[in-house]
Image (tube, rainbow, N blue to C red):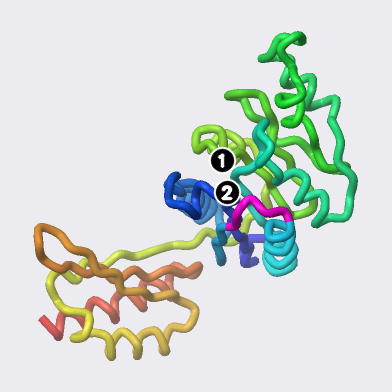
Amino acid sequence: MADRRVTAAVLVIGDEILSGRTRDTNSQYIAHFLLQIGVETREIRVTPDVEDEIVAALNALRARYDYVFTTGGIGPTHDDITADAVAKAFGVGISEDPRAIALLLERIRPEDLNEARRRMARIPHGAELVANPLSKAPGFWIGNVIVMAGVPAVMQAMLDDVAPKLVRGATILSETIDVRGLPEGAYAAGLAEIAKAFPQVSIGSYPSLRDGKFYNQVILRGRDAGVLAAAAERTRAMLGRLG
């Protein structure tokens, strides 16, 4: 429905993210991707490779949002426990899925499909597969939880596969206003007044450092083009008065 707000959360799974060894780029990519198709990311969490913590996070997020996208923990090693955690969260069994085995055999010779690689074919009962054109090992979709790989290129391919099947809300529009060197403290009160006057519009001020100098941008987001334009016009006028 065009006027519906569709929400999502991203759950990033992996000790390597929390240790700082691996940089998480997946959550940023997913949030930006979803924004373009009218799905609003409301929360991002990171959990370690601990089953009970993954289960708790999944159950909290899937009850709160329309979709939960997970990345990480569906590979062939002992610490890839996402599939088991998802099955536990939904209270269903898990076993090798013949569909997943067939996909793996498109890339792996039968004699090389060892026990470790077969782990990637363990799918919670009742889940649909998410295609992985790059390495064939699939993700899966159960309830409102979409489970994807942690390797960015593979995750992105999986997201492309599920995107056409997602319920979409109204596209979120945005206006960006360069404030340049005007300090936030100078326009904070005026911006607060505009935010109060336009509750349908999300308004944020974002400072950055460029060439040793602070620059600010005000970004306005909303679903109604007319309301967004009015809020942006008032914001520009307020900033213009401040010089």
How far separated are the C-alphas under marks 2 and 1?
9 Å
Look at the numbered disc 1 and give the secondary structure of its residue: loop
Whether pointer 2 and pointer 1 mark residues with C-beta atoms closer than 8 Å, the reply is yes
Task: Give the residues in magenta.
Answer: 47-51
- Side (left or right) of 112 relative to 198: right
Residue 230 or 49: which is nearer the viewer? Answer: 49
Which residue is at a point 42% across and 68% down the rendered structure image? 221
Question: What residue would you read off at disc 2?
Answer: 14
Q: Residues within 10 Å of mark 1 (few under 14, many from 20)?
A: many
Q: Is residue 160 left or right of residue 33?
A: right
**Amino acid carrying mark 1 in the image:** Gly
Mark 1, residue position: 150
Query: Measured from the top left, where is residue 70 in percent x and y?
Result: 63, 50
Q: x, y percentage for residue 101?
A: 79, 22
In the image shown, does 220 or 91 lie closer to the viewer? 91
Amino acid type assigned to the residue bearing label 2 in the image: Gly
Q: Which picture quadrant has residue 138?
A: top right
Q: Counting residues from the N terminus, which is met first, the one under dot 2 or under dot 1?
A: 2
User: Up-down: is 186 above or below 236?
Assistant: below
In the picture, which quadrant includes the C terminus? bottom left
- Asked if the stretch drawn in magenta spans residue 7, the answer is no
